[in-house]
Amino acid sequence: MLARLLTVLAALLLASPAATVAQSSSENAEARVYFEEGNRLFEQANHARTAQRTELLQRSLGAYVDSLRIVRSRNALFNAAIVLGELGRNDEAFNYFSEYLAIEGLTEADRENASARRDALRTEVAVLQVTSEPEGALLWVDRKDLAPRGETPIELALPPGEHRAFVEKEGFEPVERTQTMVRGVTTALALALVPAVVEPIAPFPEPAPEPLPEPSRPRLRNAAIGTAASTLATAGVAIGLSVHARNLRDDYNQAAARYTLTDDPADYQRAQDLADQTDRYNLAADVLWGTTIGLGISALVLYGVHRKKQKREAPNVAVSVSRHGGFASVRVPIGARP
């Protein structure tokens, strides 16, 4: 019975395009070498017995897998599925046939042949059939850190037991289901995917305008107060010098009157000294009075700026100082500048 089965499989392979038609010239030459090596080893396995046959089948499968690593060709998929079935690895054989049937452009005869072979394995495997609305969702089984197993609709053979299925499609909410698989049973999982809720993107807030720096009112006020205090101090010194200069003037008048009466050179010298001292004190007093006026005007201007009167015309100040006295005039216009 086993020999007859091997003869039938060999005939099918020899008659199938997968065994007789070489890879197209566009496929990688190295993949074609592995593919042909797999065919040669499988043919040798058909004429071998027991342990040697198993070894040849495993080597044939290895050659097909090496070819598939380079080019995922349908011929290598088909032949690898047959070899996996011969080795009793029915889950993998079923999945290879499923991948083969997902290829577009198969002839009707090739599709019927592969479907019949896959259906013959259903009683030996637990099958998970996943469909989704809409189609084209990615399927992971048990582990999300591995590559997806394919896109819906899809059928996968899995070991019996409990498995977790993860289904995702861009623009839809992901779905996770746990299914218990039973050998010989096809478990259908039909999913209606729900569109993902897209939260509106909040507009990026415009940066608030930077507040303009407030004028340094306390600094101006303090400057005005300090200048006013300096004005008062200078005025006090100027008053003291003026009083002392007047006293010296009185002493000079007395010394001059005595010299007129006595015609004494000592009285004359004293009168001259008093006259010089009077002039010096008057000059110093005039300078201090001028400084006092300037400081007072500065204090007024600073205070006016502090009170937001910058737009008004600045006072027109005139100061005249001489040895005979000082004169100052201040003209402050009323009202805003036109």
Image (cartoon, rainbow, N blue to C red):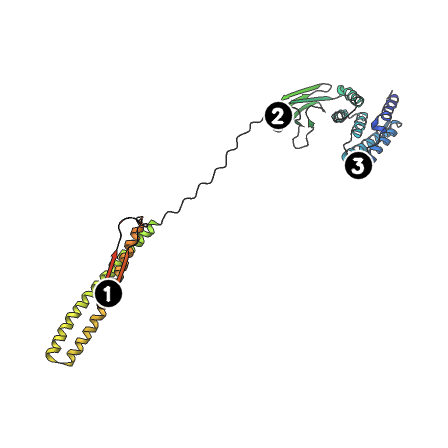
Q: Nearer the viewer, residue 59 or 281?
A: 281
Quarter-of-image position of residue 325:
bottom left
Residue found at x 83% / y 28%: 18
Q: First in sequence, mark 1 or 2: give its number.
A: 2
Q: Which residue is mark 3?
A: 28
3D distance between C-alphas at marks 3 and 1? 111 Å
Q: Residues within 10 Å of mark 3 (few under 14, many from 20)?
A: few
Local packing at callout 1 (Cα closer than 10 Å; few below 14, some 14-19, many 20+) is many
For image coordinates 65% across by 20% down, the residue present is: 190
Amino acid carrying label 3: it is: Asn
Q: Which residue is mark 2?
A: 175
Residue at 27% across / 58% down in the picture? 317
SS type, badge 2: strand
Q: Nearer the viewer, mark 1 or mark 2?
A: 1
Vertical position of residue 311 compared to residue 170: above or below:
below
Question: Measured from the top left, where is residue 318 in percent x and y?
Answer: 27, 60
Q: Residue furthest right?
A: 47
Q: Based on the displayed image, in which of its 4 quarters is residue 289 positioned?
A: bottom left
Is 37 or 160 nearer to us in this picture?
37
The residue under label 1 is 286
Q: How many marks?
A: 3
Structural distance between the alpha carbons of marks 2 and 3: 39 Å
Answer whether labels 1 and 2 touch (C-beta < 8 Å).
no
Which amino acid, mark 1?
Asp
